Every structure is written in C-alpha cells, then in structure tokens.
Image: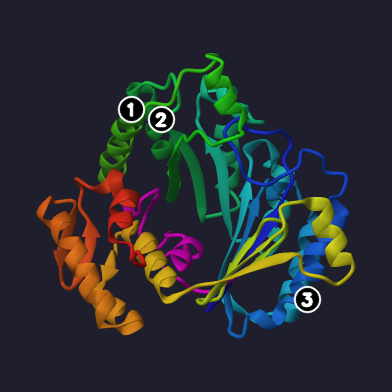
C-alpha cells in the first residue's frame, strides 16, 4: 500500500507562526491545479501498488473549488489503483466551511476532514493571525458533523498568554463537540516568521517551554480520560479513528508527494519539489519534474525508523531493527538504550522500546541519543 500527498500552496493570509510553503495570491491557482495533475501523470510509475491514503495538505486545500478538486481526483482515479476504503483527507480552515462548501466536499471523494481550529479563543486566534474567528471555529465543526463522521481538529498549546485554565477550556470545548480525533502541537518559533520578529521586538511574550510541557501533560490526562489513545506524540484518536495517512508515515510506508515543496519517500530515497510556485508551474508545463533526490544510507534509514517510531505508542521493535538492518544495528540500539532505560525515559518490554511517561515530552531528544553516528 502507498499514499499520495498533494500540497495546495495557497492561503488567504499568513499565520504568524507558519513556515510552510504557500502564497497569499491565488491568481495562479488554475495553472497550479493543471501542474499538479501533470505531475501526477509524469510520476504515476513511482507507485506500483494500491493507494490507500490520499491527503490534501497545504497551505489551505479548502480554497479549491469543486471543479479543481474533481480535476485532481479524476487524474488520480484514472491512473492509480485506489482501494475502495481509502482514507481521503482534506485540510480545511473553519472560515471556508460553509454549508455549501461542506455539501460539495461530501459529494466528492473526500471522506475525512482535518479542520485547522488551533484555538476556540479570539485572543489566541488574533495573536496567531488566523483567518477565522472563534464563532467560525465552533460553527464549522457543528456543520461538518452533519456531513462527515471522520473529523480531526488541530489545536495549539504553549501560546503566549494562554493560561492552563484557558487550555483546559479549549480541551473541554473540543470534548463537548465530540470529534473523534485531535492533533495538537506546541507553538514553535521558526526562523524568518512574523512570530519570531514580534517576539524579538517585544510585542509578543516569548514561548515558554515549561508552560508547553505542563499543557501537554494536561492534554494527555484529559484526553486519555475521555477515551482517546495518544497513539503518536501529537495525535489523539478514538478507537477506529487513528489517521491512516499519519500512521503510514511513521511506519515508513512509501508515499508520493505532489505539488511545490512536497516530499516523497519510497523506502530508499527522498525527493522534494522546488518551493516556488512560478518555477514549479513552468517546469511542469515543459514536462519536467522540479525535484531534488537524496539516496538514504542504511544509517539514514535506521535513524528515520528510530525517530518516527519512538513518537508512537507502538515504539521500536528490536526484532524489526535486526531484520531490516542487521545484528550490528540491533546491538547498537540496545547498548545506547540501556542508560535511557535505567533513567526511566524508555520502557523495555516484549522486545520493544517505548518512550515512558516521564520521557514523553523529550521523545525527539531521546531518539537523537539512539541515532547511529558514523565514526
């Protein structure tokens, strides 16, 4: 099984924290859709098996019209074998989800919505420069539930000025809305973002890691008590509603990334497209794929497995490490893990290594401790 990821690089406005590739001008949206369709055709041989996940990310895929979405789906369904129960996700902003838009999406192949709420409070949304307001956040979910059963919402914690009490309220609102999946991320300050500039100028308070850690722990306790499984560091799902797209990524399944800045992975190499809309469109109009390729060494693939699996509730199977990379890597993993087990940052049982509750917020750093470093 394999996945298709389509990057739709347009947004109504720039969120202060975002460093993804997008444009706030939609003038080239028709040409972009044509280029995405052309890239799908040029790269169809890169997927030999069935497709069981399709994911429209961005940017803001909910800016696509019914005709543009159908144009992309027509190419996918005509040239790829998509299984009947494929998970087909579209990211959407609350301000786009009118009843008319939801009817259109429900009539398409989309069967899962990922709604970028981020917060249910006006002051947080204004600080982040989100395009929607708090009322639209609530109403979009209430409306969406009439048309979709499989809904995920995004929430951000660690926002400057957000108290633990307000974070608790955010979580309670989400629980009252009864959505089956929540993805939640700590606010991070990326280079060359407006947020970084505002913090440097003293207009926004710095992000506090300790506060983010407290709010993450609050979230784990609240959502676990409500029947959610924390199956990956930032993802919480009710049984039967785990993201198949995300799970495939963490388990190293191949996926084809289409659109500017999109990444692809086939198990042995990574490709990534140019992060420039104009150059991407011009290249595809000439029948060229504007991508760079990186061949992954055995050590690279081992390190990726360590990094992605440790973020999940399944952890790392030591038997799989030996099957995939040999005894040398298995022995190295166990040797490096010994101290972390002793420090109770990793749990060891049934030939699996899993991040402990104590180590949860440190999972990326723990993974780095286990990386293979060439001498």
Q: Is residue 232 above or below residue 330?
A: above
Within-10-Å neighbours for mark 1: few <14, some 14–19, many 20+: some
Which residue in the rendered view is the most extreme toward the left?
A: 342
Q: Which residues are magenta?
A: 226-255
Element type at mark 2? loop
| Residue 205 in the image, given as x and y percentages of width and height | 46, 18
Q: Residue at x 56, y 36 (%)?
A: 191
The tag earlier along the polypeptide, 2 or 3, is 3
230 vs 187: above or below: below
**Label 1, on which residue?**
211
Pick whichever of labels 3 and 1 is earlier in the sequence.
Answer: 3
Res. 85 visible in picture: no
Looking at the picture, does residue 227 appear above or below residue 251?
above
Tell which of 294 and 188 is nearer to you.
Answer: 294
**Residue 348 percent location from the top left of the image:** 15, 64
- The numbered dot on residue 158 is 2
Q: Quick one: SS at disc 3?
A: helix
288 or 94: nearer the viewer:
288
Gap in Å between the C-alphas at discs 2 and 3?
Answer: 42 Å
Q: Which quadrant would residue 229 be assigned to in this image?
A: bottom left
Q: Position of residue 152 (x, y in %)?
A: 50, 49
Q: Residues within 10 Å of mark 3 (few under 14, many from 20)?
A: some
Residue at x 74%, y 80% (from the top left corner): 79
Verify CB contact (< 8 Å) between mark 1 and mark 2.
Answer: yes
């Amino acid at each position: 099984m394999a996945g298709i990821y389509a990057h739709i690089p347009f947004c109504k406005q720039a969120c202060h924290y975002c460093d993804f590739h997008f444009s706030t001008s939609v003038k080239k949206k028709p040409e972009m859709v044509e280029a995405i369709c052309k890239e799908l055709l040029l790269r169809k041989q890169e997927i030999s098996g069935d497709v069981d996940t399709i994911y429209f990310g961005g940017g803001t895929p909910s800016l696509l019209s019914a005709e543009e979405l159908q144009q992309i789906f027509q190419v996918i369904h005509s040239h790829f074998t998509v299984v009947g129960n494929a998970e087909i996700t579209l990211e959407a902003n609350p301000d786009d989800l009118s009843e008319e838009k939801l009817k259109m999406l429900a009539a398409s192949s989309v069967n899962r919505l990922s709604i970028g709420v981020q917060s249910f409070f006006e002051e947080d949304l204004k600080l982040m420069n989100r395009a929607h307001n708090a009322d639209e956040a609530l109403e979009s979910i209430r409306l969406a539930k009439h048309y979709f059963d499989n809904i995920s919402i995004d929430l951000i914690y660690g926002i400057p000025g957000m108290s633990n009490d307000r974070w608790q309220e955010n979580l309670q609102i989400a629980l009252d809305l009864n959505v089956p999946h929540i993805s939640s991320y700590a606010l991070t300050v990326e280079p060359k973002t407006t947020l970084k500039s505002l913090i440097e100028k003293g207009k926004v308070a710095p992000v506090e890691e300790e506060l983010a850690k407290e709010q993450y722990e609050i979230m784990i306790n609240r959502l676990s008590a409500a029947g959610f499984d924390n199956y990956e560091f930032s993802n919480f799902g009710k049984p039967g509603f785990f993201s198949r797209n995300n799970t495939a990524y963490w388990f190293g399944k191949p996926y084809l990334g289409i659109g500017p800045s999109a990444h692809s992975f086939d198990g042995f190499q990574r490709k990534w497209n140019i992060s420039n809309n104009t150059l991407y469109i011009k290249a595809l109009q000439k029948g060229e794929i504007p991508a760079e390729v990186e061949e992954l060494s055995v050590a690279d693939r081992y390190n990726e497995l360590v990094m992605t699996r440790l973020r999940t509730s399944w952890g790392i199977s030591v038997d799989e490490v030996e099957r995939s990379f040999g005894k040398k890597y298995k022995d190295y993993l166990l040797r490096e893990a010994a101290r972390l087990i002793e420090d109770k940052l990793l749990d060891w049982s049934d030939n699996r290594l899993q991040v402990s509750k104590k180590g949860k917020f440190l999972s990326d750093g723990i993974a780095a401790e286990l990386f293979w470093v060439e001498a």
